[in-house]
Image (cartoon, grey):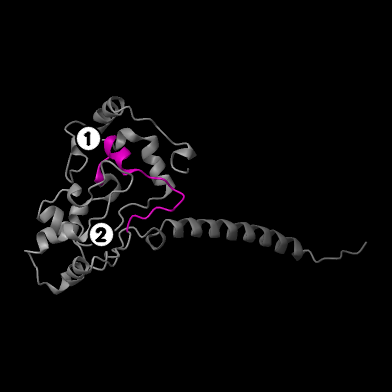
Amino acid sequence: MAQIFHRSINTISRFSIFGALFMIVALAFSFTALNRSPYATQVRVAREQPVQFSHKHHVQGMGIDCRYCHTSVSDAAFAGIPPTKTCMTCHSQIWSTSPMLEPVRESFRTGKSLEWTRVHDLPDFVYFDHSVHVKKGIGCVTCHGQVDEMPLMWRENTLQMEWCLNCHRNPEQYVRPREQVFSMNWNPPVPQEVLGPQLVKEYKIKRLDNCSVCHR
């Protein structure tokens, strides 16, 4: 019987199959890289705000504790956004006529809240409780980075599930004494691999990595 297809078809078929597989792998790799890129995660991308508030100035320069503004962080799921009157406690006396702070003064006069842009914004299907993490000895720096060195606020970590699970599965690598949770520059007095397991036991921290912990 005469050969219907030319022998080169075999080579073309093999090339097409391997080429398609290569394209699938390349697309999967590209999607993964894009999903972890600053474009998607907004890591280290400073966000525009109605007032360009500097944590570096207020925390490092003025020595203001996190809890002065984020009053509910130790007792509630949400850390809290300070009302304008908190700002005006100081700024009714300091830089009281600065043009940059006019949105703050207007908010205080009118009672209309400033519309801040969320930097650490988890999806609606994720449950996160600040107070639980504070009570278990997870420092602000662990999630938010060195905010005392941020002239403008940015996201230090991806907040993606694999990042959360790394801590949930290995809490001894991140836990610190409760009294040091709000410290920006705390260093363990002994190696973390020694202190961590001790605190995990003392604070009764469990390695929680089942879905229902965060997805409720």
Relative to residue 137, is residue 69 depicted above or below? below
Residue 122 image offset from top left, x and y in percent: 39, 53
| Sequence-earlier tag: 2 or 1 | 2
Q: Amino acid at mark 1?
A: Arg
- Does 14 sit left or right of 81 as displayed? right
> Would you name the residue on which mark 1 appears?
178
Query: Residue 4 falls in which quadrant of the image?
Result: bottom right
Q: Position of residue 197 (x, y in %)?
A: 29, 27
| Residue 137 spot, x, y in % from top left | 26, 36
Determine the residue positioned at 30% across, 40% down. Answer: 131
From the viewer's perspective, tell me whether residue 175 is left or right of residue 101: right
Residue lying farthest right?
1
Residue 48: quadrant of the picture: bottom left
Q: Is residue 176 above or below residue 9?
A: above
Q: Residue at x 21, y 58 (%)?
A: 150
Estimate the x, y position of residue 91 in percent, counting from the top left. Answer: 11, 63
Report how far apart the C-alphas of labels 2 and 1 lie in the structure: 25 Å
Q: Looking at the image, which is closer to me, 181 or 100? A: 100
* The furthest residue to the left: 93
Q: Which residue occupies the foreground of this view, 48 or 146? A: 48
Give, as a three-letter code, the residue at label 2.
Met
Please tell me how many numbered marks the rendered image carries: 2
Pointer 2: what residue? 153
Secondary structure category for the residue under label 1: helix
Give the residues in magenta: 119-140
Please name the predominant secondary structure of the magenta segment in the image: loop
Q: Which mark is residue 55?
A: none
Judge left or right: residue 68 versus residue 2. Answer: left
> Badge 2: how crowded within 10 Å, few (<14), some, or many (20+)?
many
